[in-house]
Structures are given as structure tokens and as C-alpha cells.
Image (cartoon, helix red, strand yellow):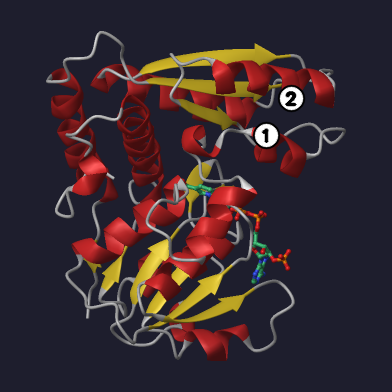
Amino acid sequence: MTAHIIDGKSIAKQIRDNLKSKIGINNSAISPTLAVILVGDNEASQIYVRNKKKAADEIGINCQILELSSSIGENALLEVIEQLNTDENIHGIIVQLPLPKHIDALKILSKINPLKDVDGFSPYNAGLLSYNDQKAFISATPKGILELLKSTGTELTGKHAVIIGRSNIVGKPVSMLLLNNDCTVTITHSKTKEIASILRTADIVIAACGQAKLVKSDWIKEGAIIIDVGINREDGKLCGDVDFENVKEKAAYITPVPGGVGPMTIAMLLSNTYEAFCLQKNQKQCCCKDKKCHSH
Ligand code: NDP
């Protein structure tokens, strides 16, 4: 069996195009506006933020980047967030992670107004997700993963999903989201014993551990769906957490790296920003009321 490659790039483009047309027909004088807080000069963060801004600009979302010194104090950063919270022309706020070590990320994320928390990283939105409350802003990567799974047309109910990784930004929220979608979920991490034998029981594998090509073809069940979140660099080339070339011969569906989860993460962030804009403007055409809508 050779797997069907899930084309995240093209699915993400459809979502962005859909959002662009909705934003285009918006009668409001104000554009949806996303504020991105970038602390310090982490090179990878600068690239991610630039890519988010480019994608936002292309569909008519105004993206304001606030570049702050790595020496900024916690209180000063909290003050910046408070100003954005009360600015009614700002609809979404994200704090690019990681933050410098002297800053408590949880304290900072907790400060973001939940209605503007379009990354869904605040404890409030994480809590709503665990309650399976539809009002939750679900973080972009897990939300994008769910869309990729749905694109395969596979019924998720009762499927065994094994997640590799338990971070607050990917592993835990994607586990909760799949649980909310009636999967049976197993979370694995660096201390998990016999990880390969657990993975062999998985109908769905979500690899989010940041270990290049960790998942081998003899770790997976014939016909499994493989979602590779990892972004690693090996011999100067990007690769995921899955040994793609070999695993694709055994899986039913697989995402490539690049071109799988990455583009979906940005599309979903834009979708959340548009949703936040609609909620704050209390617009009747809010896309989140439309169950068939693929823009969020
Ligand atoms: P973290 O480093 O925060 O978490 C990694 C997780 O993987 C931890 O829970 C860790 O376990 C677990 N882990 C590490 N090594 C192993 C191993 N050998 N076996 C099993 N589990 C292991 O990473 P993130 O969650 O932030 O990101 C994961 C990957 O996804 C990275 O490559 C990142 O670049 C990528 N990423 C991609 C995005 C995209 O849009 N495509 C978005 C976000 C992240 P423990 O908790 O025990 O330490």
C-alpha cells in the first residue's frame, strides 16, 4: 500500500481563499486586526511571525507586529497586553512563544482577554476545550490537524488515536480535541515505555515530539492515518517526526513535511482571528454559526 498524501498546502489555501472572500464582503469600516507580540530576537520566531503577517495581509487581515526587547520585564509585558485587551480595534492577540526565561509564560497568556485569545493558549480557552464547549478558541495546530483528518473522509468515532508529545501547544490540546470527537486517545511522551508497541495499535498517529524521523514503518499498523507535526532540520533539509519515505508505504494517509500541518496552522490562526472579529463586532454573518463552514 502506498499512502494517499494529505495536501495541507492546498486545503489551507482553500480555507484562506474562503476567509478572503468573507472579509472582502464585510461592510465594516474596520478590518479584522491581529496583534502579534514578539519578544527578543529568536530567529525561528521571527520567521514564523513574518509568515503569519504575510498570510494575514494576503487575505485582508491587518497584522500588527509589536517587537519588544528580550530584556522587557514581566510587568511591562502585562501592561502591553492590557492595552491591547482594551483597544477595540484589536480583535486577536498572540504572544509568540517561546518567551525569554525570566518571563512566566502562563502568567502572560492568562492575561490575554479570552475573546481575543486566537491562539487558544490561555488557561481559560484550554479549560473550555476540556469541557468540549463550542465557545473555546481552539489552538491553531490542533484545529488544523482535525481538518486534515476530516479531509480523509474517515469516521473518527471509536478510532484509536495515539499522540506522541504532551506539550501545552500541541500534544495536550490535540488529545482533548480528538477525545471530544469520540476517538479513544492515548498520549505518549519521552518517558513512555514500549512506545512502538502502543503505536502499532493506533488507527491515527499524531507525531508531535520534535525528533527527526522517530516514527519508523514497523511502529505503525497497516492502513493507519499519520499526521506529522514535527519540524526538524536534518542535513540542511526540513523533515518531520516520521520516517516519511518508509512509513508512506504502509499508511493509508500521511501528511508531508513541509506542506502538511504547517500551512494549516497559519490558516487556522487567521480563521480564529476572523471569528474573534465577528464575535466582537457581533456580526450576524459570523462564520462560526455555519456548521458547514470550512474557514475555521
Ligand atoms: P515540545 O518540545 O514542547 O514537546 C515535545 C514533546 O514530545 C514532549 O512532550 C516530549 O516528552 C515528547 N518527546 C520528546 N522526545 C520523545 C521521544 N523520543 N519519544 C516520545 N516522546 C518524545 O514540542 P512542541 O509540542 O512545541 O512541538 C513538537 C514538534 O512540532 C516540534 O518539532 C515543533 O517544531 C513542531 N511544531 C509544528 C507546528 C506546525 O505548525 N507544523 C506547530 C507547533 C509545533 P516530555 O514531555 O516527556 O519531555
Total numbered labels placed on residues in the image: 2
Residue for point 50% across, 66% down: 131
- Of residues 56 and 277, the one drawn nearer to the viewer in this rendering: 277
Tag 1: Cα neighbours inside 10 Å, few (<14), some, or many (≥20)? some
Q: In which image quadrant can residue 97 be found?
A: top right
Q: Earlier in the sequence, mark 1 or mark 2?
A: 2
Secondary structure at badge 1 equals: helix
Q: Are marks 1 and 2 in contact (CB under 8 Å)?
A: yes
Residue 9 picture location, percent across and down: 26, 43
Three-letter amino acid code at the position of disc 1? Lys
Three-letter amino acid code at the position of disc 2? Leu
Residue 213 picture location, percent across and down: 53, 64
Residue for point 48% across, 14% down: 64
- Of residues 183 and 162, the one drawn nearer to the viewer in this rendering: 183
Residue 134 picture location, percent across and down: 37, 56
Tag shown at residue 64: none
- Of residues 119 and 55, the one drawn nearer to the viewer in this rendering: 119
Q: Ligand 1 closer than 8 Å to the CB at disc 2? A: no
Q: Is residue 51 above or below residue 224?
A: above
Give the residue at mark 2.
78
Q: Quadrant of ligand 1?
A: bottom right
Q: Is residue 122 above or below residue 255?
A: above
Q: Is residue 61 left or right of residue 119?
A: left
- Of residues 234 and 253, the one drawn nearer to the viewer in this rendering: 253
Q: In which image quadrant can residue 209 be found?
A: bottom right
Residue for point 21% across, 40% down: 287
Q: In which image quadrant can residue 147 be found?
A: bottom left
Give the residue at mark 1.
111
Q: From the image, which quarter does the C terminus lie in?
A: top left
Q: Is residue 131 left or right of residue 27?
A: right
